[in-house]
Image (cartoon, rainbow, N blue to C red):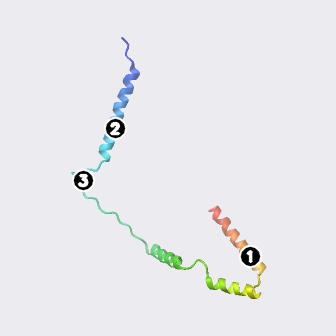
């Protein structure tokens, strides 16, 4: 009579795996009878972080667009007094483009 060793090993492995699973579940479940009280976690915010938070709050309260500046430009355009400085505009576009490219490399 021949004994199939493969079946014996697979059933033994299954028993070992199920024992490990039961041990992991038992170890992960909280124990209320023998556990000591845990200290509460705490977080300390640095002075610099508090300052940054204040600045962020002030910036979020500011409008996205300077409405007075927009009104001045509209009035100047309507009166034909608005002049575009092409060199200044080109310099601003160039600066903006270089700042964008630096963002992609970081």
Q: How far across and down, in percent of the image, does residue 50 sit?
A: 45, 75
Q: How far across and down, in percent of the image, does residue 3 sit?
A: 37, 16
Residue 20 image label:
2
Side (left or right) of 22 relative to 58: left
Q: Disc count in the image?
A: 3
Instruction: Tell me which label, 2 or 1, sits earlier in the chain.
Output: 2
Q: Which residue is mark 3?
A: 35
Residue contact between numbered discs 3 and 1, judged by CB atoms under 8 Å: no
In the rendered image, the quadrant that contains the N terminus is top left
Farthest residue, direction left: 33
Q: Residues within 10 Å of mark 1 (few under 14, many from 20)?
A: few
Q: In the figure, 1 relative to 103: above or below?
A: above
Residue contact between numbered discs 2 and 1, judged by CB atoms under 8 Å: no
Give the SS element for disc 3.
Answer: loop
> Which picture quadrant has residue 14?
top left
In the rendered image, the quadrant that contains the C terminus is bottom right
């Amino acid at each position: 009579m021949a004994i199939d060793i493969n079946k014996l090993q697979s059933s033994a492995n299954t028993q070992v795996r199920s024992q490990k699973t039961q041990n992991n579940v038992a170890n992960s479940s909280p124990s209320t009878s023998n556990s000591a009280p845990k200290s509460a976690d705490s977080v300390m915010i640095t002075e610099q972080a508090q300052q940054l938070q204040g600045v962020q709050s002030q910036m979020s309260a500011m409008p996205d667009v300077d409405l007075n500046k927009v009104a001045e430009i509209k009035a100047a355009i309507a009166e034909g007094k608005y002049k575009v400085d092409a060199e200044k505009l080109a310099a601003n576009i160039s600066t903006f483009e270089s700042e964008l490219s630096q963002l992609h490399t970081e």
